[in-house]
Image (cartoon, helix red, strand yellow):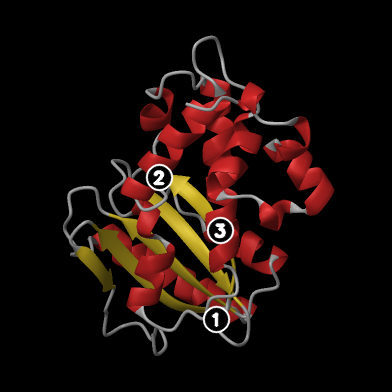
Amino acid sequence: MTSIKDITKEDRPREKLLARGVSVLSSEELLQVIIGSGVKDFDVVKISKELLRQLEANNGKLTLDEVTKIKGVSTATAAKLLASLEVASRFTKIGTVVRSVDDVAMILSDIRTKKQEHFVLLTLDGADKLIDRHIISIGTVNASLIHPRDVFAQALTDNAASIIVAHNHPGNSLNPSDADVDVTRRLTGVGTLLGIRLQAHIILSAAGARKIETSALDLGNI
């Protein structure tokens, strides 16, 4: 197998990027730039090939445990790689029009199978395009943990016209709890006062996605 030492200096990934731009690099070469260098007996080329194989097999998603199991990948390198993948994923979705439960499920596909509840805020502009996503809380979703100020402070910072909130159910149930409904009611009321409409509160799980429906609330048309 070719190693990085066998490649002429001008054709090495970092040198190619600096001389000719990032777009000329293959996916494998981009991984080599992120990794930086290999370790004894595990050249960066060999590591990048295995990383690319696993990324392709897992639709571009890997966990910390999966990355660090690859021989030659340190915890620091794994963290850098996962951070790069997350940034790329987020910026790919920014600007996406969000008008259905399925849209929310796509944007938040990474939290659907989390083992802890993640309460996430999506901020939207006046055309229902995604501005950003924010994790508000990790843990049980209830009125004492999800405070409207934490949600709307981010919405105001993003200059959002409206928001969508969502959380996952690790038990795979899509049925809202009383606490879920209470959180939705409180956020709806505060949003009305601030002029930032809560479009929906979505429950996510491995089983699918569901909007919290309640006759007492008007959550828009999503």
Q: Is residue 160 left or right of residue 27?
A: right
Quadrant hosting residue 179: bottom left
The residue to which callout 1 is attached is: 192
Tell me if I can see residue 184 in this picture: no
In-front residue for pair 125/153: 125
The amino acid on which the numbered mark 2 sits, given as a three-letter code, is Leu
What residue type is disc 3 on? Arg
Determine the residue positioned at 70% across, 35% down.
12
Residue drawn 25% across the image and 53% down it = 169
Q: Depth check: give the residue in front, 33 or 79.
A: 33
Mark 1 crowdedness (10 Å alpha carbons): few <14, some 14-19, many ≥20: few
- Residue at position x 54%, y 72% in the image: 190
- Quarter location, residue 115: top left
Query: Nearest the camera: 205 or 137?
Result: 205
3 vs 2, front mark: 2
**Where's residue 63, x and y in %?**
39, 36
Picture residue at 72% right of the left edge, 31% below the top: 8
Up/down of 189 relative to 86, above or below: below
Q: Quadrant of residue 67?
A: top left
Q: Earlier in the sequence, mark 1 or mark 3?
A: 3
Provide the residue designation for mark 2.
55
Q: Earlier in the sequence, mark 3 or mark 2?
A: 2
Please give the residue where the numbered disc 3 appears in the rendered image. 90
Q: Residue furthest right?
A: 19
Mark nearest the camera among 1 and 3 is: 3
Q: Residue 95: where, in percent of width, then height?
A: 60, 74
Q: Secondary structure at mark 1?
A: helix
